[in-house]
Amino acid sequence: MYASKVVQLSIEAFGEANGVKLSPDNRWVQAATLIPWPELEEAYKTVFPSNKGRAGKPFRLLFGAHLIKTREGLSDRELVDAIRDVPAYQFFMGLPEYQPRRPFVPSAMAHFRKRIAPIAELLENIIGDWTRKQLVGSVDDKVVILDATVTPVNIKYPQDYVLLGQARRNTEAMVTDLAHKLEVPIPRTYRREAERNYVHFTKHPKRTRKATRGMVKSQLQYLRRNLRYIHEFQDQGGQLTSKQTQRLEVIETLYEQQDYMYRNNTHSVERRIISLSQPFVRPIKRGKAKPRNGTEFGPKVDVSIIDGVVGIERFSFDNFNENQDFEDALYHYHDVHGEFPDMALVDKLYRTRENLRIAKNLGVKVCGPKLGRQPKYPDEASERKAKKEEREAENARGEIERNFALMKLKHGLGLVRAKTVETITTTVFTAMITANIDAVLRLFSLPFVLYVRYEGQILKIEYNDSI
């Protein structure tokens, strides 16, 4: 169950008994008074189906800690230690006073990330609406910016023979466990010979294509034999654990894919498995990617910027063509404002003939180089004007690239270390939330000057703050 607890905090009262004083210029102190905690907490209540049982920890306590973890790039263990040592973190998380101890155990964060995964998009929408209200009048109106990126996860670069070797060792352990449970002799799996050949192959610094193909073939043969033994033991009443059963399903799919690629002499197969522990991760080709072969491994995100608010148009672990989301993004803008944007800033991948036709019918201008041959301009002045417009549009589109750089360098999307579908999803959506919060904090840190007329005199008030 979840029991909400409202605590009104003030900077002056926080930590007064312990002599702790907070600076009003601290970014976390300022964010604590700006973020719409009540709306977020109402969304969090929906994940608790019952009003019985032990009450969960306050939402602001855990979500505030999760935002700190994302923004500062800390592990769960480092996070609880940092919260213990930094009073501003505790104020941001809603604690009534400074406590010189850990507020919770590190494992609580893992449970919390799984719990908010179903409402991650809802939380992101709430922060997006709040950000839009805070930024009203400070950004260009009637402009939508679109682009896609891949958020790589922390996995080993996949090699066919490595995956098969790992699957072989897993199935050997399953065969041994089932034999012990059925009290029958362990069948011959040739595990020593298989491991010796595998290690001998991996130690060669230069492996030919023929040798690699031979290793894949031998590993497939060993794996085929092990799978046959497992199925025979299961027919005799042997039971695997739930974790072993899940791994066996992944291994069987891996075997089918690798056997198909070996027999057809190809390296491409639909929904290819590249990790036994994370079978949902897919290889995604990216033209601008730095890894070898231009391939990244992780979910793909189609992102939009509307009124300065970073939002997700599509999130998927499978590869997709982002130009298919162009029309939906325009209607998303229409849902927010009641009208279509005047301009869409996109790269060449979005500027297909179909999307240009859709934009023209909706009265949306798509900036960028024209398709096909370069147009012939009547004079040099017209050519300079057209190229200047294209250059300015590309510079404006750079805002979304800057946000990608910020989220990958500062908000943990450069290398996602989460392991499950739920926690990876939560990590990506939280990075978007943190980026929007940072945009609001940057706005409030801008210097401004006020002129006030009072009793016939004009007073000048200057405000300059930096976060």
Image (cartoon, rainbow, N blue to C red):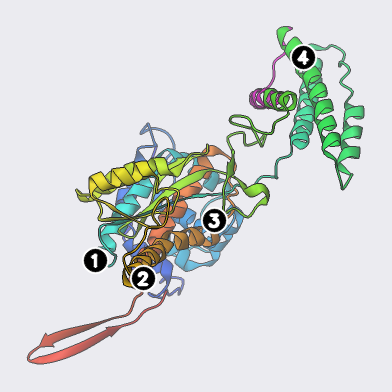
Q: Which residues are magenta?
A: 236-255
Label 3 sits on a secondary structure element that is loop
Foreground residue among 164 and 178? 164
The quarter of the rendered structure image containing the C terminus is: bottom left
Main secondary structure of the magenta stretch: helix
Is residue 161 found inside the magenta-colored segment of the image? no
The residue type indicated by label 2 comes to: Arg
Few, some or many residues within 10 Å of mark 1 (<14, 14–19, 20+): few
Residues under labels 4 and 1: Cα distance? 67 Å
Marking on residue 228: 4
- The reply to whether callout 1 and callout 2 are in contact (CB within 8 Å) is no
Label whose residue precedes the other's in the sequence (2 or 4): 4
- Give the quarter of the image for residue 383: bottom left
Label whose residue precedes the other's in the sequence (1 or 3): 1
Residues under labels 4 and 3: Cα distance? 43 Å
The residue type indicated by label 4 comes to: Arg
The residue type indicated by label 3 comes to: Gly
Query: What residue would you read off at disc 2?
Result: 384
Label 1 sits on a secondary structure element that is loop
Label 2 sits on a secondary structure element that is helix
Residues under labels 1 and 3: Cα distance? 30 Å
* Nearer to us: label 3 or label 2: 2
Is residue 247 found inside the magenta-colored segment of the image? yes
Residues under labels 2 and 4: Cα distance? 71 Å
Left or right side of 370 for 82: right
- Give the quarter of the image for residue 45: top left
